[in-house]
Amino acid sequence: MSTNVLEHKTSNLIKDAGSFPSSEVMLDLKNLKKVYPTPKGDYVVLEDLNLQIKKEEFVTIIGHSGCGKTTMLSMIAGLNPISGGYISVLGKHIKGPGPDRGVIFQAPSLMPWMTSLQNVLLGVNQVFPHATKAQRHDIAKYYLQKVGLEDAFNKKASDLSQGMQQRVGIARAFAIKPKVLLLDEPFGMLDSLTRGELQDTLIEIWNKEKITAVMITHDVDEAIFLADRVVMMTSGPKAKIGDVLDIDFERPRTRKAVLEHDDYYKYRKHLIDFLEH
Amino acid sequence: MGLGFLGTIKDLFTGKLEKEDFISFLRKVVVPLASILLFIGLWHMGSQSLYNIEAEFKIEKALEDQGPAAAEALRECIASGESGCQPNTLPSPSQVWASYQSLLRDHNIISADKAAFIEKTAVLNEKRIAEGKEPITYTGRPSFVDQIFRSLKTVFAGFLLALLIAVPLGIFIGLSPTLKSAFNWFIQIFKPVSPVVWYLLVFMIVKTVLIDSNEDSSFTISFISVGLCSMWATLVNTAMGVSSVDKDYINVAKVLKLGSFQKIFKVVLPSSLPLIFTGLKITLSVAWMVLIAIELLAQSPGLGLFVWEEFQNGANDSNAKIIVAMFVIGIIGFLLDRLMLTIQNWVSFDKTDAI
């Protein structure tokens, strides 16, 4: 059956996962380990986690709740200390957070007392300190336009809907021009209609910027639609990479074309089989 | 704003009141008015019965000590309403109202007197200033309204002192766990100390610091005491607000690598403003509450001293004047609280947060 072909293909990929030419690798996770000490002894969340992500690649990470996906992402962001192994961006080991890794959080995390423009400028001012004020405003406004908020520059973040707030979050992350974009279930709190719209916005702006992206999601369709590769994590404790699935759809993609593609249901079945197994 | 019923009354007269608003009108206007009337009625009856007890006791005593003739004379004297023989007890609402009006009249007389004095001495004072001498100032006794403004001045000076000490200190304590453990014992021990003791402490220090000064230090002592008594709520709330900023905001600040200055002024402070203002609101009401006791001790002019002097005075309408002062103190306290709430709503980003 066709799944055999797929399995063959993915098993090849797992073999290859750690062996991209170093010039192509943007983000490298090597023997990554995370341990939380508890009164009953150490709790190992992640162990021997190896993952390489290429330049201009969009990777989605899928796995059961509590398997350590978010822990892994916040370690990449530098918000959570590493217990073992290392994470490197373009060959340089990371030490703490920095604007080379933009993060879109699960909650929009905008400063509610600032306008959407001020929220984006907060990052832009930090990353482009030598640009003139007008240039920085132009950058912020450009990205707000890109996410469809040209009418809401001066609206207070607290006056925006959840979906619009997350759009500002996307603009804020892209506007600082990071090398790697980290997305922690950014659409998890939205209704499915808004979620679809935001996926379109995200992929549109990503097609233009081609920033290496790592995104956590619970949504199998979202994982397939957005990604070049879907990484499946085993359940914790001691979670690691369970399987990797290559998504061979052409870019730019439309939702319609993806849904009508013959391979779509094969991919979907593969992911669901993994999650239910 | 708590004064919403005024809007309802306006609607009533402009005919905008809908039928379904009737119940809310009842609740917001009629019920408070009825409860006020009930309160005044109970007060009236209470003061009446206290008056009777006191009067009977006086007559009984006169009978025992001086015989039936004196008792009868006293009974007539009390009935005639002459001020010299009235029983001294809780004044009735009408007496309090009369005292309020007499205090206002007194104020008008004093202000007229003051204006006349300033007019009379204007030419002389110009000459004195030209000659380099001190101008002559009005030294008559302050009116009740003057006392109110003196009290407000003291309370705002104290509040400002509390704000200038407690907010910056609270920020530092909230930001640094080390400072927090350094200051925690200090806060825990000094927070419950009584206003009277604070006054005595400030008095000990200020007396020595201003040893060379001939000026009256009672104002300085009372506003510093008020500030020290009332700053704790702001200190604790600021520290709590700063140390409990939403973790998401802190993560954003970390990811964007904001400097500490930017982090404090753009993220930490705005997000803790609601709690800081809650603290400031408590501070202002505590300041107003302890002010009376402190003015009384410090002999600093103001409502507290007014109350104390009236109590010592023991004149026929003294008790009524004390009750007038009590209402004035209460109403001003309420207005100060509303003022802070308005400012809080105005600066706070989250409109639903304010209580």
Image (tube, rainbow, N blue to C red):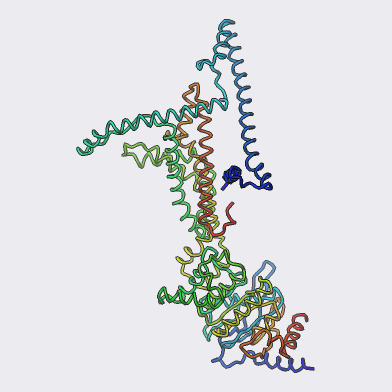
- The picture quadrant where one finds residue A276 is bottom right
Evaluate whether residue B257 shows in this view: no
**Which residue is depicted at the point 54% across and 75% down?**
A171
Evaluate whether residue B286 shows in this view: yes
Question: Residue B173: x percent and y percent?
Answer: 50, 57
Question: Residue B39: x percent and y percent?
Answer: 62, 32
- The picture quadrant where one finds residue B56 is top right
B297 with respect to B125 (left or right): right
**Which residue is depicted at the point 43% across and 28% down?**
B106
Viewer-proximal residue among A135 and B229:
A135
- Asked if residue B32 is positioned above or below residue A20 in the image, the reply reads above
B308 with respect to A37 (left or right): left
A132 with respect to A257 (left or right): left
Question: Residue B327: x percent and y percent?
Answer: 53, 34
Instruction: Count the marks.
Output: 0
A46 with respect to A273 (left or right): left
- The picture quadrant where one finds residue A253 is bottom right
Which residue lies most toward the right here? A1
Question: Residue B91: x percent and y percent?
Answer: 56, 25
Viewer-proximal residue among B272 and A138:
A138
Viewer-proximal residue among A10 and A160:
A160
Which residue lies most toward the left here? B131
Which residue lies most toward the front here? B15
